[in-house]
Amino acid sequence: MKNIAASIAMSTLAATGVEAQEERRRVAPPAVYDVAPGLGHFTDDVLFGEVWERAELKPRDRSLVTVSAIVSTGKTAQIGGHVRRALDNGVKSEEIGELITQLAFYTGWPNAISAVAEVKEVFDERNIAPVVSSDAARIELEATAEAARTATVNTTVAPTAAALADLTNRVLFGELWQRPDLSARDRSLITMAALIAVGQPEQLPFHANRAMDNGLSNTEASEVITHVAFYAGWPRAMSAVPVLKRVFEARADKAATPQNKASQGTEMNIQITRANTSATQGSADYFTGEVHVSTPYKGNEPARISGATVSFTAGARTAWHTHPLGQTLFIVSGKGWVQKEGGPVEAIAPGDVVWIPPHVKHWHGASADQAMSHFAVAEAESGSVVTWLEKVSDEDYAQGVAID
């Protein structure tokens, strides 16, 4: 009888231990299991049981990415819990404060001010003293890259918004990015995470390149997208994937190009890219219909220019896209259409020259009943020539029929 009682007691203790272990493992609040048990499972077993355990990003970096995503998207109710986790993961209080300051410029003052109130409660709870700005030396930005960035702002922004250009150069990059309260790498990590979270893929090439120049690896950059998917949604993460892919490819191409003039041999000579009949099929990721790209060329550094002849069969077109420094199209043959977002579809014909300004979302291609070929020329910024976006829908494309 005593043996039976002992067995029952041991079984009870074992069951209690399992239940306690299960409770300790859970991160999702009990209400989640009461209302959405599937969400509870994915929260505990996938998000915290798998994603947060991945070694591709350190826990500290994951906390920086997470707090950036929820601050930038205004999810104030979630800030306190993740700030506590960030502090536990080694993020310093002054770094959290500087994260909020950084995001004020990239996702707006209201989000930043709202985040301050939530963070202050956590700091008070943990008896963290008021944060004081660091008196360390300012971070020196790379001079050549800064000169190129400043020139781009002065050329593309200043003519339309002179005050914005001045504040961009003088305050955003002249002060904020040089503050020593966060490392350059962490500022880039925070900014990149926020841009993905708020759905700004057009701005991602510059900041992804900057992040990797500041020490973020390709693996870490990819993991940022994966992590943000859980905090800002799959659509925004998936929209960032092709943009980052282009950045990776551009950086790999640049790394494979000799930079030493002595090793470039004939690179200082005139180059002729001969006409040829062979062409490559345009990627289905970036084009609709049958598209062929031929005679591609690329200027040698310090030039940033590149181009190719692109031929579209009737009805074929590009996806929506932007160019960091604009694009010029020379129409060679046939009849085509071009459209900027929010504008009318416009017809283009042989001999026409089309200029698309920097960062203008647009598409171009053949008309519905005729093929079209054009020669496209663009310049790279930070290794990126184009940012591909979503496909042009049949409904958007059909707007061109009205102009024929």
Image (cartoon, rainbow, N blue to C red):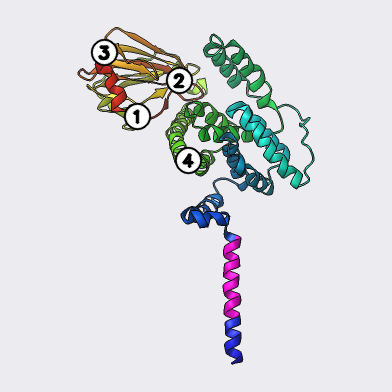
Callouts 4 and 1 close, C-beta under 8 Å: no
Q: Which residue is mark 2?
A: 265
The residue carrying pointer 4 sits among few (fewer than 14), some (14 to 19) or many (20 or more) residues within 10 Å by Cα, namely some
Identify the magenta region.
10-24
The answer to which of marks 2 and 3 sits earlier in the sequence is 2
- Mark 1–mark 2 distance (CA, rounded to whole Å): 42 Å
The answer to which of marks 4 and 1 sits earlier in the sequence is 4
The answer to which of marks 2 and 4 sits earlier in the sequence is 4
- Mark 1–mark 3 distance (CA, rounded to whole Å): 21 Å
Callouts 2 and 3 close, C-beta under 8 Å: no
In the rendered image, the vertical position of residue 44 relative to residue 341, given as above or below: below
Q: Nearer the viewer, mark 1 or mark 3?
A: 3
Q: Kindly state the secondary structure of the residue where label 3 is placed.
A: helix
The amino acid sitting under disc 4 is Gly
Q: Which residue is mark 3?
A: 403
Q: Which residue is mark 4?
A: 233
Q: Residue extending furthest left?
A: 369
Residue 346 x, y percent position in the rendering:
32, 13
Q: Nearer the viewer, mark 2 or mark 4?
A: 4
Q: Nearer the viewer, mark 1 or mark 2?
A: 1
Q: Name the side, left or right, on which 346 lies relative to 200.
A: left
- Mark 2–mark 4 distance (CA, rounded to whole Å): 49 Å
In the rendered image, the vertical position of residue 68 relative to residue 105, given as above or below: below
Q: Which residue is mark 1?
A: 391
Q: Residue at x 43, y 38 (%)?
A: 235
